[in-house]
Amino acid sequence: MKKEVKSMGNETICERLACEKGMSLVAISLIIVIMGSFLTAGSKLYDVWNSYSAAAETDEKLDYVQGAMQQYLARNGRYPCPASLTAAIDTGGYGVEAANCAGLASAVGRDARIVRTGAVPVRTLGIADKYSYDSYGHRLVYAVTEEYTATAAAGGAPVGQDNGAIAIVDAAGNNATSTRGNIVKIVYSMGRDRNGAFTVDGQNPQACDPTLASGENCDFGTNATFLNRVGKSENDANLFVHSMAYTPSETVVNCADVPGAVTPKDTAFLIDSSGSMASSGACPDSLPGCSRIDVARWAMRRVMPARIYNNSRESVPGQTSLTGFVGYSNVNNVKRNIGDTPDGLEKIIFDDPTVAGYEAPDDDTLNTTLETQLQSYCPRNSTPLGIHLLALADGLGKGEPDRPNRITIISDGKNTNGTDPIDIAKFMQNNPDDYGDIQVDVIDIVGNDDLREISQRTGGTYYRTDNPDDLLDALFNSAGACNFTPPTPPVDERGCGSSGSWGQTN
């Protein structure tokens, strides 16, 4: 006998769908369909999560490798060559940069310069093997402008510039960077795409098909152009889910090429005058046998007039200060020597258009005053970098968001006296109300990760160069010295701390 069908309420599925004891085949089928829909949805969600997780992990690896590359550059003055894409794990050639980039894929990039491509040299970089491959079981690919794999002293490109030969384009072939072909290095993943990819163990099961969407990224033996695009293809017949990381140096664009570029407001130049600056340096033609302090003076003779010229044409010009190391042990000692007030810069202000009745100095006066000050920086003693950084930051003040105040440091070494400059940079970073609009640019003559961190934490730019021309360019960029026709070239005079055939130590 059939049960009466109950009204809507708390009845069970069985009560609503069947009036006999047990379930009908229709009810069972419907339940199976419902459960299947949940399983299918769950499977799709899992696929989405799995795809996102793999992409995120790969992006983290790319960022980590880029960081390792920058550390290698700071220590060695060059980028490493790529490693072999085919060397098996735990063989002698695995993860080791190819000597002089020999045997690697080679293509002609911008200005007929060579780009070399291979695997990430994880063992040369000193990082774990897991950073040689992505989350899809493929080796990461590393391409680099070959001339940046040798130091400037060995005939390589100056690392303080970005004059790369690698081009990045979008899906329509448009240039994807500020200047076509300005990328020095790139690290990327072929993603889920097997087109031309190499397995973890260095196998290449599928040759590169340049007609596919991903062909631009696997034909690196033919050209130095790589494709990156926002819309990634999930078409199994023509996959494109690649990801890449590339970091053009902040020195790439001369400030004269930046639309609307302005000079920093208040600027303080700090010249490292520790004893090591008397060491022999890489010399410009006018200073044979020079020292590092000679190169710093040589560059400042050319940049300071440009800074004053450009600053004077700002609607609100700022002050310009210049100092070497003037105190040791504690910041109060330094402050007494740079200003008449605890937070002042009065004694080291070189040019101050803010005073009433100001007139810009003529060339002769400026050069004479500058030379007198530069000659007072005689290399001696230790490196009290941190306490000078804090004293200058306190004296400069906060600055403005659109025209930050700037400290530009030329140095060749780590802090050896007083507070660690990284602690000072962290302090500035953690107190944006007082220091948020002060940038610290560092021109590093030797290569020092500590100096890099100072600039990174304060939003400044790090320049690593031992080449005098590149040091000069870096100093021009830091000073915001745009569109300037220099006056009569300055005379490079002998000074204390000079060395070699050009000068003598006084």
Image: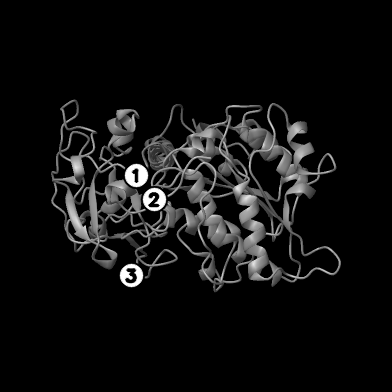
| First along the sequence among labels 1 and 2 | 1
* CA neighbours of label 1 inside 10 A, class few (<14), some (14 to 19), many (20+): many
- Find numbered disc 3 in the image and state the secondary structure of the residue it sits on: loop
Foreground of the two, 33 or 360: 360
Which numbered circle lies on residue 159? 2
Residue 34 placement (x, y as % from top left): 44, 40
At label 1, the amino acid type is Arg
Give the residue at x 20% y 51%: 195
Q: Which residue is mark 1?
A: 78
Query: 288 above or below 333?
Result: below
Q: Which mark is residue 480?
A: none
Q: Residue at x 53, y 33 (%)?
A: 275
Residue 406 x, y percent position in the rendering: 66, 52
Tell me if residue 5 comes above or below residue 474 in the rendering.
Answer: above
Q: Residue 389, percent across and down? A: 67, 39
| Residue type beneath disc 3 | Gly
Q: Is residue 211 visible?
A: yes
Foreground tag (2 vs 3): 2
Q: Are marks 1 and 2 in contact (CB under 8 Å)?
A: yes
Tag 1 and tag 3, C-beta contact below 8 Å: no
- The residue positioned 62% from the left and 27% from the top of the image is 417
Q: Quadrant of residue 350?
A: bottom right
Query: Which callout, 1 or 3, points at the residue further toward the start of the chain?
Result: 1
Counting residues from the start of the chain, the first of labels 2 and 3 encountered is: 2
How dense is the environment of label 3, judged by Cα within 10 Å: few (below 14), some, or many (20 and up)? few
- Name the amino acid type tagged 2: Val
Label 2, secondary structure: give it.
loop
Which numbered dot is residue 173?
Answer: 3
